Image (cartoon, coloured by chain):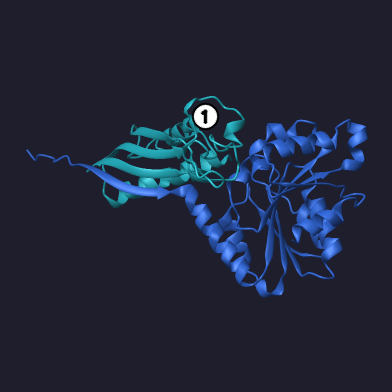
Amino acid sequence: MEKKTIIEKEIVIETDFLKKNDEIAERVKKMLESQQVRAYDIMGSVGAGKSSLIISLVKRLKNEKRIYAIAGDLTTHIDADRIKNAGAEVVQINTGRECHLNANTIYESISRINLKNYDLIFIENVGNLICPADFNLGTNKRIVVISVTEGPHMVLKHPYTFWSADIVAINKTDLAGYVEVDPNKLERDLKHVNPRAKVYKCSCKTGEGIENLIGEMLK
Amino acid sequence: MSHGLNMSNIIGEAVLLQAEKTRARYVTEVNIELGKLACFSRRDMENYLLMRFENTVAEGAEIKVTEIIPKILCNECNFKGELQAFLQNIINMEYYRPRCPKCESININLLKGKECTLKQIKIIQ
């Protein structure tokens, strides 16, 4: 009777799968730097005003800067169409069931364009205040958009996303009185969670505060 | 799809690929290091992997997930060490706003605590 030999083995792998994203993000950063392109990762909940902010920025900057936008969404191209209508070149990334963009999607996206043709890239992340924060995209700055219509506790309920922000735009301030949410309270919460972040109150609809925000972004 | 599931799928695929390469008859153990600041929980990782390994050579493998306490270097006071708050399994603001335990600065570099590392597997050939 044939005897089967049993061999037990330990196989060392040592692969950090989350670090892979950071490695690709570093590659993206170098590509952008080499062509002097500035990129912004714009995060926020669904309905906070990420697309509206990009549209405001495009309308104000399109005559002096060459702008490309990447719109991340689960399934539609609604945002990409709106941004295109405002005057920017745009590509839509549909993530299907994925709740965030990652560095590889950005790497693939910018590899398909000639970066020499652009000065600014706005990346609209998937509407979600949790997951996108964990995935560095290799951009110059992270901007989180929050609106007063989301209620008074959004910052403290989602601190991690705000902790990673360079700039926070408190949007829809024109509606603050109607929804009885004090933008100053949101600002205080932001200072508690992330004292480093620059906070700007604005309304993409009325245009209030947008110029100051642009000034900070382009610094 | 949560990225916990996505990441577990990636790890599951890596385990099964190694098993195939090494002609494993069974995978008996999978060792993973998961930072406490990684974007998904140990419980999710274990559960998703159990599902991924069903009807494969890794079905029944012991999945060992070691949680890594975040370690920082403070850029203000040069403190280097673990964030003791993470030793307790209480989710509080420290989870989202880690700071130096010595001078309370948030101007810190995270040295450990966000990893999701497939360390090694044990197989039977």
Q: Quadrant of the N terminus of chain A?
A: top left
Is A176 or A113 nearer to us in this picture? A176
Query: Is residue A33 rendered to the left or right of residue B64?
Result: right
Where is residue A73 drawn, in percent x and y?
69, 49
| Residue shown at 32% from the left, 43% from the top | B120
Write down the colour of chain B: cyan
Where is residue B49 drawn, in percent x and y?
43, 36
Is B85 or A71 nearer to us in this picture? B85
Query: Is residue A85 rendered to the left or right of residue A193?
Result: right
Q: Which chain is blue?
A: A
Where is residue A22 drawn, in percent x and y?
52, 54
The reply to whether residue A97 is visible in this rendering is no
Is B124 or B38 nearer to us in this picture? B38
Mark 1, chain letter? B
Residue denoted by label 1: B85
Where is residue A196 drawn, in percent x and y?
68, 46
Give the SS element for disc 1. helix
